[in-house]
Amino acid sequence: MKKQLYLTTLLSAVILAGCGSAVTPSSAASDIGEAKAKAIALEHAKVKEPELTKIHVEKETKKGKAVYDIEFETKTKEYDYTVTQEKGEILSSSISNNMKDDDKKKTTEDNKTADKNTQNNVQTKATESTDNHASSQPNTSDSTKEISAEKAKAIALAHAKVTENNTQLLKVKKEREDGIKVYSVEFYVGNTEYDYDIARSNGKIIQYDIDVEEQKHHTPSTSIISLAKARSIALQKVPGATSKNIHLSLDDEDGKQVYEGEIKYKQIEYDFEIDAKTGTFLKWTSERDDD
């Protein structure tokens, strides 16, 4: 009897051990691992590991998904990737090109020189007007000139290797970054957002970000309206706006498919959500954009 009880206990232990070993591989299979996630990001960025000056990998949860947040740097660029732990899909990526401290210092000095020379020009013109010296010539040094907004836009588009016709929500505005006068150039191409800071004094790209929006794989459905239809519905609410003024994408909100988007037209910014099944607005807000 004791022998039979011992054999039964032993058999149960073996079965339980077998079940445990069966669960472990399944659990491991749900995570590609830090090394694989890092390799995916580096391959996408076309960066080799010896080129790295810094790298940090951390597990996080974003929008309910287990992901790896991977940040790394080379001598000239900074990268930030979000990669899913389960399948290794890239949900988002950004690239920043930051100037070295010496370059920033030089650009700042160029701006100060431009400001000083511009002030001198104003004083010179005032003196000429007072003294009525028609023969006097104002200082026309190149350092007093700023590139135009059109030039900054052209520089950004050329760097991104896109044409203006392919962009949405293209915007150029004057700003200051770390004391440097810049043009901020922002635009979308498809599901990718571009953001450039370009020095007004010399047209140099101080930094840029390229953000790829999360790509959701939706089950094909004939019961939802098309992207073109959703765009048309939204544009009807803003007379005069065209496809150049709108950006939208199909998203999931608590299991419900919606089109999320924004329209920028005549210094007004509109944010909206459209039910992808019925075409009705779930959200519509507007605010003045004076930038």
Image (cartoon, grey):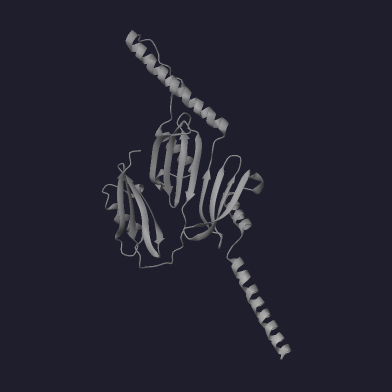
Q: In what quadrant of the picture does the C terminus appear?
A: top left
In the current view of this chain or complex, which residue is farthest to the bottom? 1
The quadrant of the picture occupied by the N terminus is bottom right
Q: Quadrant of residue 126?
A: top left
Q: Is residue 186 visible?
A: yes
Q: How many marks?
A: 0
Residue depicted at 33% across the width and 49% down the height: 263
Residue at left 36%, top 15%? 125
Q: Out of 192 and 256, give the one closest to the viewer.
A: 256
In this view of the protein, which residue sits in the foreground, 41 or 1?
1
User: Residue at the location (54% across, 51% down)?
Assistant: 81
Q: Position of residue 174 (x, y in %)?
A: 40, 34
Up-down: is 45 above or below 99?
below
| Closer-to-camera residue (265/27) | 27
The spot of residue 161 in percent (x, y) is: 48, 44
| 28 lies left or right of 113 | right
Work out which residue is located at the far right of the displayed protein and give it.
3
Where is residue 112 shown, x and y percent of the image?
47, 24
In this rendering, the answer to whether 62 lies above or below 266 is below
Q: Nearer the viewer, residue 2 or 176?
A: 2
Residue 90 lies left or right of residue 191; in this view the side is right
Residue 142 appears in the picture as rendered:
no
At x 44% / y 23%, what residue is drawn? Answer: 115
Could you tell me residue 220's position as x and y percent? 42, 67
